[in-house]
Amino acid sequence: MSNAHKRAGFTLIELMIVVAVIAIIAAMAIPKMLSARLAANEAAAISTMRSISTGEACFRSTGVVDSDADGAGEFGYLAELAGAVPMRVSAGGVGAAGAALPATTDILNPSILPPQLGAVQNGIVARSGYFYQLWLPDATYGGIPEEANGGCVAGPFPDGNTGEVAWACYAWPMEAGSTGNRAFFVNQEGDVLGCPNRQVPQYTGDPANGGIAPNYDEALLSAGDMSSHYREGVPGGADGSSWALID
């Protein structure tokens, strides 16, 4: 029998070499894959924020929510724009002179935003590695967050006048450094801003489970005033965050 027929399979040394080569390739490829996923999640978050901005402008212009009956439409919550919950004026919002409006089950149809943005849990939406939260103003431009299951059916309700003027939405990573790095902001001005998210505390995770999220006025020049201009390039706010325009 020839030597060629005596040899079968691989030697231990050959197998170890193959394993070592695979390990080296994996060590080089995995970080690039994670970096690519992180970049893709951030790009998707920016695109989503722009879609929300466009959706809010469309929602207001249609006048489907006019809780003070003055003929001017108001901005809406994510679940309202996505057609996931009754619009608040239809769910017993407060009308002119404090009059209660009739409670119905009016759902926005067709919806302005995709159904995924209407899947609100604990007041926030989870999508593609990011959390989203939207706020509407009270009578003094303080922020009222979306309710736990979406929209606003129990109150306190956004104000009929200020609700025609302002809104704010934030997006932050589910796991900072893994699903995304930056946090994002957009409001009635239509510009998307990004935060490097290196401040302490860092925005990450679900607040209901110990995560940290921006407050409604974190990216604004004036604390507690949703009508104020956004704060660009100057660290500040309650968290010492810094925000810059996204091209």
Image (cartoon, rainbow, N blue to C red):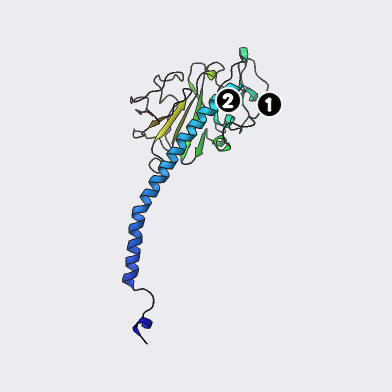
CB atoms of marks 1 and 2 within 8 Å: no
Amino acid identity at mark 2: Phe
Helix, strand or loop status at disc 2: helix
Q: Which residue is mark 1?
A: 104
**The quadrant where residue 2 appears:** bottom left
Query: 166 or 246, which is in the foreground?
Result: 246
Horizontal side of 58 relative to 233 (left or right) equals right
How packed is label 2: few (under 14 Cα within 10 Å), some, or many (20 or more)? Answer: many
Amino acid identity at mark 1: Thr
Where residue 40 sits in the image (x, y, percent)?
A: 43, 42
Q: Which residue is mark 2?
A: 59
Mark 1 vs 2, N-terminal side = 2
Helix, strand or loop status at disc 1: loop
- Front tag of 1 and 2: 2
Q: CA distance from mark 1 to mark 2?
A: 19 Å
Q: Tell me the quadrant of the picture where the N terminus can be found.
A: bottom left
Query: 19 or 136, which is in the foreground?
Result: 19
Where residue 138 sits in the image (x, y, percent)?
A: 52, 19
**The quadrant where residue 63 appears:** top right
* Position of 112 relative to 29 (above/below): above
Residue positioned 34% across, 59% down in the render: 23
Query: 120 or 165, which is in the foreground?
Result: 165
Q: Residue furthest top?
A: 97
Where residue 41 sits in the image (x, y, percent)?
A: 44, 41
Horizontal side of 23 relative to 66 (left or right) equals left
Count the marks: 2
